[in-house]
Amino acid sequence: MKYQIVLTGVGGQGTIFLVKLLAQCALNKNIPFIGTETHGMAQKGGTVISYLKIGDFYAPLVGKGQADIIIGLYPTETLRFLEYLKKDGKVITNVTDNFNLPKMENLNIFTVNGSRLAVNGEINPKSLNVFILGYTLQKSPDFPFTKEEIEDGIKAINAKFADTNIKAFNKGFYYRENL
């Protein structure tokens, strides 16, 4: 299996936690992985981009046009890194009430307003990242990890907040937009 993931957001949203979580899932399955993150001004709300490659790779950066999936926690950051998506890849991103992604032809884009759910108290704001990961699994049956494997990874990474994170993750996994 070879799978390339780009995760992006702004500082404080938990992008780096997601990379660590997915790396833990690969470790639990004894699958080779390599990754990296760039978070220069992240503490001030700046861009965070992380790469994770699952399988036999030798360099951690995902090249332009190579990502199987982009997981975005903030819509403008998702837009910034669309060039990394391969032709048949998927984009899963959080959107906000004041900013939605423009309509784009020929892209597999799935959006969810997790920010609104956090503001309304339906999910813990600190767990928005795992909510988006749950939504990612719902929309990506080819994702390299199962629901159970990610729940096990959540428990291994941060047992103290595992219940809260698993609850948000499951809310994303089962989320249906009210139409």
Image (spheres, grey):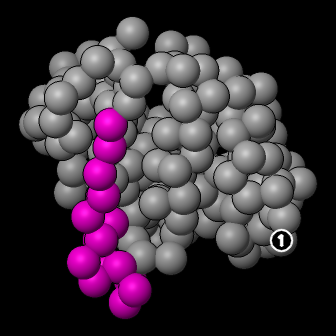
Residue at image position (40%, 24%) is: 32
Is residue 78 at all visible to an observer of this figure?
no
On screen, 110 above or below 41?
A: above
Q: Does 160 sit above or below residue 136?
A: below
In the depicted view, which residue is nearer to us: 161 or 115?
Answer: 161
The N terminus, quarter of image: top left
Residue 177 occupies quadrant: top right
Q: Quadrant of residue 159?
A: bottom right
- Going 60% across and 21% down the picture, which residue do you hit? 29
Q: Residue 74 location, x and y as percent?
A: 43, 63
Tell me if residue 91 is in the magenta stretch. Answer: no
- In the image, taking residue 92 as reference, residue 165 lies left or right, namely right
Residue 27 at least partly seen: yes
Residue matched to label 1: 121
Viewed as shown, does residue 112 lie left or right of 102?
right
Q: Which residues are magenta?
A: 34-49
Residue 2, above or below 27:
above
